[in-house]
Image (cartoon, grey):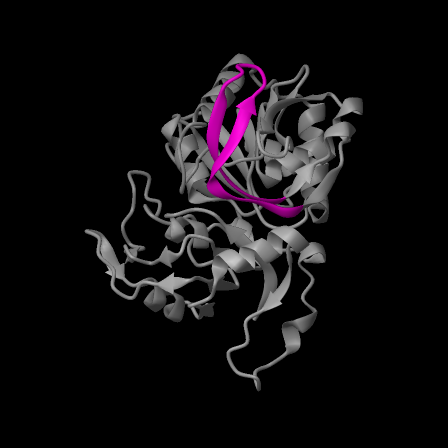
């Protein structure tokens, strides 16, 4: 099994991490030395909104897993199976007893690269030519038809699904919205047909340039001044739609302890992140966006605000899961924008 090899610095949260669609096409290396000690909970346990309580999608999204010490003894009140059993059930290859910190040092020095987990030398070699950067993951991580969540009479938010996490839906429902989840390539007419109070562009895997249809729709959202929130990949898509450029980071940001500064409040927040691409800071100079957040470690762009229109975006995951909930207020700011800017339908 081949994929782009990346590392995550989180100590816990492997169930949420492995089911995050943003990891589609990647082999994940955990830097924390012991993984699996609290097992895997039931996928049948749902939250108050009917969404799986401990998972971010319906299946494991990574192509493979690399850990140092795999705990085969799991202890937790909601544990149903071990991590090893879960991987076996979903046919995801994994390797343990690897010096994952030494491997991480190689990735940090050389950058992310393609890798392959070989279980048997005679196995099929068909995916050796897999190219993560040019691959379009959208048909694999998005939905094929509209899906509805929440109460019908609530204000309606269209969620353009480029690989959304359940926690994004969960937080929109928490705010009292109804959510209409649409396929990644939905046109502006298909979006507006639902008479939304606002639009959210979700997280997801791969190079944002591949999402040409989503970028086109995002440009129309900007043109029409639709209240919009972009998250992770959605942040990059909005930037591209506004005339900025994106680039691939050397080894990306993946973990639950990434420090970002809100340039308006001057507060530093601990964020959950999972992305391999970023926005070129200088390219924003000729756009109508200004920088909202910056990464403390490398000064990369972590959030945007439109200068005039009700459009905001963040590169990190304000919904966390896993991770700290320092940035849940981003959803509240989006709600404020929705309330303050009523969409006038023609």
- Residue 179: percent from left, percent from top: 46, 35
Dividing the picture into quadrants, the one containing residue 245 is: top right
Rendered residue at 43%/58% (across/down): 59
Q: Nearer the viewer, residue 5 or 338?
A: 5
Q: Nearer the viewer, residue 73 or 140?
A: 73
- Assign the magenta stretch its main secondary structure: strand
Quadrant where the C terminus sits is top right
Query: Magenta segment range?
Result: 250-276
Rendered residue at 44%/50% (across/down): 17
Is residue 162 shown in magenta?
no
Q: Nearer the viewer, residue 220 or 305?
A: 305
As drawn, the residue found furthest toward the left would be 77
Is residue 268 shown in magenta?
yes
Looking at the image, residue 176 sits to the left or right of residue 123; the answer is: left
Residue 143, can we see it? no
- Residue 220: percent from left, percent from top: 71, 30
């Amino acid at each position: 099994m081949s994929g782009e090899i990346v590392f995550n610095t989180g100590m816990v949260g492997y169930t949420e991490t492995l089911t995050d669609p943003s990891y589609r096409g990647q082999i994940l290396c955990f830097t924390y030395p012991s993984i699996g000690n609290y097992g895997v909970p039931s996928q049948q346990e749902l939250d108050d909104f009917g969404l799986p309580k401990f998972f971010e999608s319906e299946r494991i999204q990574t192509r493979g897993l690399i850990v140092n010490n795999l705990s085969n003894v799991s202890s937790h009140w909601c544990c149903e199976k071990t991590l090893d059993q879960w991987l076996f059930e979903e046919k995801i290859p994994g390797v343990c007893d690897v010096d994952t910190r030494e491997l991480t040092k190689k990735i940090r020095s050389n950058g992310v690269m393609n890798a392959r987990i070989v279980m048997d030398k005679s196995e099929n070699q068909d995916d050796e030519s897999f190219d993560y950067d040019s691959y379009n993951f959208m048909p694999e991580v998005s939905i094929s038809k509209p899906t509805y969540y929440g109460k019908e009479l609530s204000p309606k938010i269209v969620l353009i699904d480029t690989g959304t996490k359940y926690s994004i839906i969960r937080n929109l429902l928490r705010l009292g919205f109804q959510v209409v989840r649409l396929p990644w390539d939905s046109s502006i007419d298909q979006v507006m047909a639902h008479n939304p109070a606002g639009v959210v562009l979700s997280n997801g895997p791969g190079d944002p340039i591949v999402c040409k249809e989503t970028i086109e729709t995002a440009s129309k959202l900007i043109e029409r001044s639709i209240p919009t929130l972009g998250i992770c990949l959605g942040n990059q898509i909005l930037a591209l739609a506004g005339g900025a450029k994106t680039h691939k980071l050397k080894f990306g940001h993946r973990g639950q302890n990434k420090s970002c500064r809100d340039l308006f409040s001057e507060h530093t927040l601990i964020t959950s992140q999972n992305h391999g691409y970023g926005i070129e800071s200088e390219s924003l100079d000729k756009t109508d966006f200004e920088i909202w957040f910056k990464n403390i470690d490398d000064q990369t762009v972590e959030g945007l605000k439109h200068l005039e229109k009700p459009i905001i975006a963040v590169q990190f995951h304000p919904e966390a899961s896993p991770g700290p909930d320092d940035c849940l207020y981003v959803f509240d700011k989006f709600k404020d924008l929705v309330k303050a800017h009523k969409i006038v339908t023609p």
